[in-house]
Amino acid sequence: MAMASYVKLILGSIAFAIFWVLAVFPAVPCLPIGRTAGSLLGGMLMVIFQVLTVDQAYEAIDLSILGLLFGTMVVSGYLESADAFKYLGKLLTWKSKGAKDLICRICLISAISSAFFTNDTSCMVLTEFVLKIARQKNLPPQPFLLALASSANIGSTATPIGNPQNLVIATQSGISFGEFLTGILPATILGSIVNALLLICMYWNLLSVKIDEEDSAAQFLTGDGVSSHHFSPATMSRLASSSSQGRLPGLEITNVLTSPHVNGSVNLAYHDTLRNRVNSDQGETEIHGFLNGPWESRNSNCSERWKRKLWKSCVYLVVVGMLISLLMGLNMSGTAISAALALMILDFKDAVPCLEKVSYSLLIFFCGMFVTVQGFNKTGIPSALWELMEPYAKIDQVSGMAVLALVILVLSNLVSNVPTGMLIFLFYVALSS
């Protein structure tokens, strides 16, 4: 691609630099507007500086990637509601054989869950279980949290839905879900094994020493506890008032019905009271409700449990069907959105609570990023940089792959991984053309 005019080149570089600074440092003192607003600002500046027209800016937004992101977020939300991550958390301690075994389990479960449910969701949900397990077993949490974070990043590389940059690469390059998985799975497995071994070696001594009970209790009391149970104030106050008077709700009726003898003598008032209540409609209703209420409540609870089990089974079946469809090569965005809609229908409730879990700020960030990166590509700078780097980054040579990997590693830490993925893809487009 030919270089743009000097004016567009300079203005486009300024817009991209503003986007980059706000993406890497969202709390810049001179402009603390955050990543999402910074991304929109970068895209808007590309239009204002006439690097892109308005129509070109809209065309730069990849709706298939946004749809895939939206669908996977909704599916992850329903999986969390169906206790999928709770079961994964239980696997961490099932027949555990010590701290080193636990760190290996965390690496494995984190890698697998992040590959199919995105690394962000895996880290956010499993962190709670890791902290809880570490506190219960009086273990230092640092090695396990590092294992969770590193394994989530490694495992998320295995599939296109594991992280946003994979979505960009797979969708815009046309690589199918199965091709992506089979192509990178060996490297993901090897990386997960090496990561677990390194963590065990680094923290060998720390994993062999338990922290004191007092330290663990102190951490819990100072707010390091994972979660706390929230009781209803109304229920607690009613229970407290009844117990403060030396009785519980419903105790008076129970005494009347079940205590015909008091202090060894027949309670004459018992028969009169019972006869009066049976003869009156109000008393009959009370006795009938008291006698049958527990059974009705028990049947109702049993029915609710079966309904929830059936709903959770349906959620898992839909997710498995979505993964099978992706492996069969169906459109990833359409498959994810269809699975999300199927789960909304199966839930048979207002979908607003689940839709509120969707990170709309991330979707907006992607919109601004698409426009900004497309504008930067129009300046011709990515093509020029690729021409300079191409002789040293030939992917058909070991030295070239090493150079390219080093460049990607540096850019991912400096520019963030998603913009780096977009830039590398632009290099790929420049090479293809």
Image (tube, helix red, strand yellow):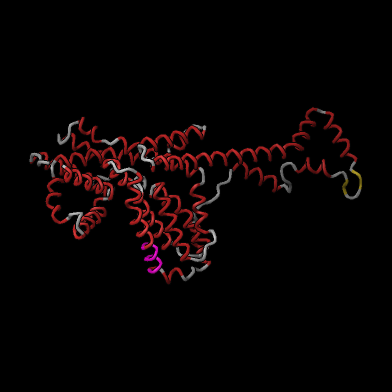
Q: How many marks?
A: 0
Is 358 positioned to the left or the right of 15 in the image?
Answer: right
Q: Point out residue 7 in the picture as x, y percentages from the top left corner.
A: 9, 39
Extreme residue in the top direction: 281
Extreme residue in the left direction: 6
**Residue 375 is inside the magenta segment:** no
Residue 357 appearing in the image: no
Q: Point out residue 285 in the picture as x, y percentages from the top left corner.
A: 77, 31
Front position in the image: 395 or 213: 395
Question: Which quadrant: the C terminus?
Answer: top left
Front position in the image: 388 or 249: 388
Is 346 positioned to the left or the right of 322 in the image?
Answer: right
Residue 71 appearing in the image: yes
Q: Point out residue 290 in the picture as x, y percentages from the top left corner.
A: 75, 37
Above-or-below relation of 146 to 425 = below
Q: Which of the 4 image quarters holds residue 109? A: bottom left
Is 112 positioned to the left or the right of 25 in the image?
Answer: right
> Would you say the magenta stretch is mainly helix, strand or loop?
helix
Q: Which of the 4 image quarters holds residue 41? A: top left
In magenta, the rendered stretch is: 194-201
Q: Look at 33% across and 37% down and name the residue there.
A: 66
Above-or-below relation of 213 to 24 = below
**Residue 197 is inside the magenta segment:** yes
Q: Look at 47% across and 43% down and name the residue there.
A: 79
Q: Point out residue 425 in the picture as x, y percentages from the top left corner.
A: 23, 45
Q: Which of the 4 image quarters holds residue 357? A: top left
Front position in the image: 384 or 143: 384
Question: Which quadrant: the N terminus?
Answer: top left
Is 258 positioned to the left or the right of 2 in the image?
Answer: right
Q: Look at 42% across and 70% down and name the residue there.
A: 204
